[in-house]
Amino acid sequence: MQNYIDKLAVLHNENSDLELSQALSLRLSVPLYHSVDNKTPEDFFLSWRDGCLKLLDKELLKKGGLMVDIEPRQGEQRSWPAPKEGALAQAIGRKTRTVVDATTGWAQDSLHIFRMGYELTCIERSPVMLELLHDAFQRLEQVDWVTRLALSAPKLLPGNAIEILGQLDNAPDCIYIDPMFPAKRKKSALPKKSMLILRELLGADLDKEELFVTALQATAKKVVVKSPDYAQPLGGKPAQSFKSKLLRYDVYMKGT
């Protein structure tokens, strides 16, 4: 997943630690800049701003950028463990203990799963997203309720989930998959800026069918697949399906 090469650079913010920016540039093998202009060849930048690592494009340079948000989304509980309510919680199940998110991305579902009290492991293959996630999970461990309850951030595994799932020491109760589906051709359903940038940097999600087959083999009990309501089920007819606004969570049981 090196699709970001020639598209991405690190932009050092004078209010942040230069050594952090230098180390990030080396890890990702991308240039380090102290300023950018219209002649800068890269279109995307990682930069520390407002106490966190952010991903920007040239349009967002003056707007703050995108980060992995560790705060609950609108309507989600701030308590821990949060009530296991809603379509996602129904799909994962109350009796489930261990969950692996095989496609972590911006981690909004991952963090919701974490707040509901599940034992969570996150897998991410994009080196760019891994940097953003690592920064977010460090911030998460400094949040007052996390420290007060002596909790740890979810375990973060770098690499391709297709390879990692077959090497897990213990089969998780549930494997969660949120693949990239083609956007619906409708002007009123434009993808969010975060997804547009991710698609541009990482390319299409071409192996989701293989990931599903691997997950069904690796899980102890079930695989949950999140999809837009217009998409065909990834693994054929599911055992159960739970719907929320514009989304669907299809449940596939091991051995069925």
Image (cartoon, rainbow, N blue to C red):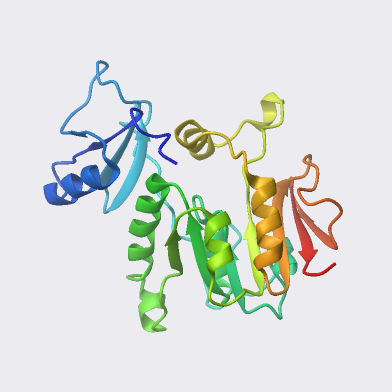
For image coordinates 71% across by 81% down, the residue present is 95
> From the viewer's perspective, is residue 81 above or below residue 78?
below
Question: Which quadrant is home to the N terminus?
Answer: top left
Q: How many discs mark residues in the rendered view?
A: 0
For image coordinates 49% across by 50% down, the residue present is 106
136 relative to 25 in the view: left or right:
right
> From the viewer's perspective, is residue 115 above or below residue 151?
above
- Image coords of residue 201 (percent x, y): 44, 34
For image coordinates 33% across by 64% down, the residue present is 138
Residue 222 shows in this picture: yes
- Image coords of residue 88 (percent x, y): 69, 62
Question: Which quadrant is home to the C terminus?
Answer: bottom right
28 relative to 197 in the view: left or right:
left
- Image coords of residue 71 (percent x, y): 46, 60
For image coordinates 62% across by 73% down, the residue present is 172
Residue 77 shows in this picture: no
Is 193 in front, or is 104? 104
Q: Residue furthest top?
A: 39
Quadrant in which residue 43 is drawn:
top left
Is 208 in front, or is 224? 208
- Image coords of residue 235 (percent x, y): 78, 52
